[in-house]
Amino acid sequence: MSHQTPTRTQKTRLDLQAAVDRGGRLVAVTAYDAPTALVADAAGVDIILVGDSVGNVCLGFENTLPVTMAMMRHHLEAVARTRPKAFLMADLPFMSYQTGAEDALRNAGELVRAGAQAVKLEGGPARVTAIRALVDAGIPVMGHIGLTPQAVHSMGGYRVQGRDEAQAVQLLEDAKQLEGAGCFSVLLECVPLELAACVTKELDVFTIGIGAGPHCSGQVLVFHDVLGLLEGPGPKFARKYMDTFGQMVTALTRWSGDVKNGVFPGEQESYNLTEAVSARLAARVSGAGSPAPAKRRKGP
Ligand code: KIV
């Protein structure tokens, strides 16, 4: 087999597992386009997830349900073009895998062709057949249980999952089934920290938590929540490290004021003619004895 000379070192799922086995914690963040991916990679995160949260975070939908494969692919391609060093993965959107293993294979294959090194899908034992098919096809799969946003209607809203004993035991069983089906990792969303700790202890593969406490092998957050790109306090489980929304509004308001007050653009944001050309042009527009300016031709 011939190899292309590698021009970058991108993390692999084995690097991630090895880091956890050495006692490290993994950092994952969502990214949806080239600028967010470049920031995430410059910050040295381990995993970039092109999440289907693109629907509510970037595309103005109320939830993730309207997100299609075409949308996921469009955003994944933008992220992949930045050639990140982070492990790059993407969500399989609603109804791209719930309909069976064949659809899961076709759609996951599309995401891998677009640059994803793994896919994430939501659900427990009902997904085992699809997960096995993907793993058999050489596509690494991260399972996602707990609060699964694509099942918002059957959950009756976005609520913490696994609070009572029966639910907690079920979630632990689900996690084991996902591992047994071949998932390289399990993401736990909005579950009590004691349950997430228990799942993390019981599994050999690493866990990634969001709203699942500090005992998971790693943490993931939505880019816009960490950086405060959206107005308002954000979800309880996120921590805002910057008020980017506020800073952007302040900056844009200053620029707007400069435009209205005639302070922008100034000399340094403008271009000049040479003095000679400028003088001849001035003579033309002042009119006296000078030929009328040539009529602009149509076209370029
Ligand atoms: O799409 C998303 O943002 C997710 C989160 C759990 C990180 O899946």
Image (tube, grey):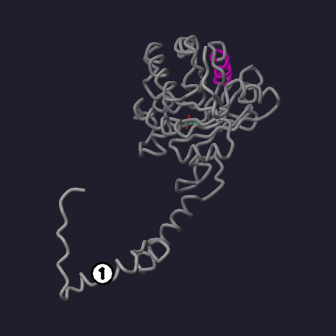
Q: Is 219 located above or below residue 137 in the figure?
A: below
Locate residue 187, reporting x and y percent.
63, 29
Name the residue at the right extreme.
Answer: 22
Image point (58%, 54%), residue name: 228
Indicate which quadrant contains ligand 1. Answer: top right
Task: Determine which quarter of the picture holds residue 87.
Answer: top right
Name the residue at the bottom extreme.
Answer: 288
For numbered disc 1, what is the local secondary structure? Answer: helix
Q: Is 176 located above or below residue 192 in the figure?
A: above
Nearer the observer, 36 or 9: 9
Residue range corresponding to the magenta coloring: 166-178
Nearer the observer, 254 or 125: 254
Residue 167 in magenta stretch: yes
Image point (77%, 24%), residue name: 201
Q: Amino acid at mark 1?
A: Arg
**Where's the N terminus, which quadrant?**
top right
Q: Main secondary structure of the magenta part?
A: helix
Neighbour class for label 1 at 10 Å: few (<14), some, many (≥20)?
Answer: few
In the displayed structure image, the side of residue 147 where residue 45 appears, left or right:
right
Q: Which residue is mark 1?
A: 280
